[in-house]
Image: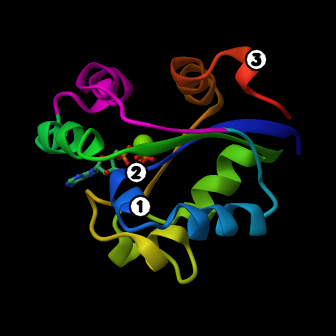
Amino acid sequence: MAVERTFSILKPDATERNLTGAINALIEGAGLRIIAQKRMRITRAQAETFYAVHSARPFFGELVDFMISAPVVVQVLEGESAIAKYREIMGATDPAKAAAGTIRKVHAKSIGENSVHGSDAPDTAAREIAQFFSGNEIVG
Ligand code: ATP
Ligand code: MG
């Protein structure tokens, strides 16, 4: 076990429904620390870069349109095994398949509008954190 950092986004469906505090309470309740956080509107170019791995998927256009449809909250989370722990408390991509009590089960609207993003591996976490935060914005 090691202390890790992961990158999180509270997505437009969460900010629109005023759920950022409710989701942060679930994050902190799981023992993860929010060591950087800012609310912003991301540009189309930022969204396309962020989800470039999905650019060939049929839902890519819809995904980018959704991510720029309202503000998001970008975060860095820190804790023991933070990457896997956050994926666990987020729940499955499709809220209908997510475990009881997970963020997506409790709050997500659909497989597309699913409230949160979390990095899936150490290399993607480092890349995603660097896309949105400079070092002096992260205070552990
Ligand atoms: P994220 O990367 O946002 O943390 P994830 O790792 O659970 O989510 P991915 O397979 O990486 O899931 O998909 C990225 C995002 O693309 C999903 O969170 C969701 O918003 C959207 N998405 C995935 N599959 C679909 C789909 N079949 N239809 C519509 N949108 C989808
Ligand atoms: Mg993913």
Which of the 4 image quadrants contains residue 105? bottom left
What label does residue 11 carry, if any?
Answer: 2
Disc 3: CA contacts within 10 A as few (<14), some (14-19) or many (>=20): few
Residue carrying label 3: 136
- Residue in the picture at 58% in, 71% down: 22
Q: CA distance from mark 2 to mark 3?
A: 24 Å
Report x, y in % for residue 129. 60, 26
Q: Which residue is mark 1?
A: 14
> Which of pointers 1 and 3 lies earlier in the amino acid sequence?
1
Q: CA distance from mark 1 to mark 2?
A: 5 Å
In the image, is the residue at mark 2 within 8 Å of ligand 1 by its beta carbon? yes
- Dot 1 amino acid type: Ala
Of the image marks 2 and 3, the number of the one nearer the N terminus: 2
Q: Residue at x 45, y 66 (%)?
A: 18
Location of the C terminus (image quadrant): top right
Callout 3 amino acid: Asn
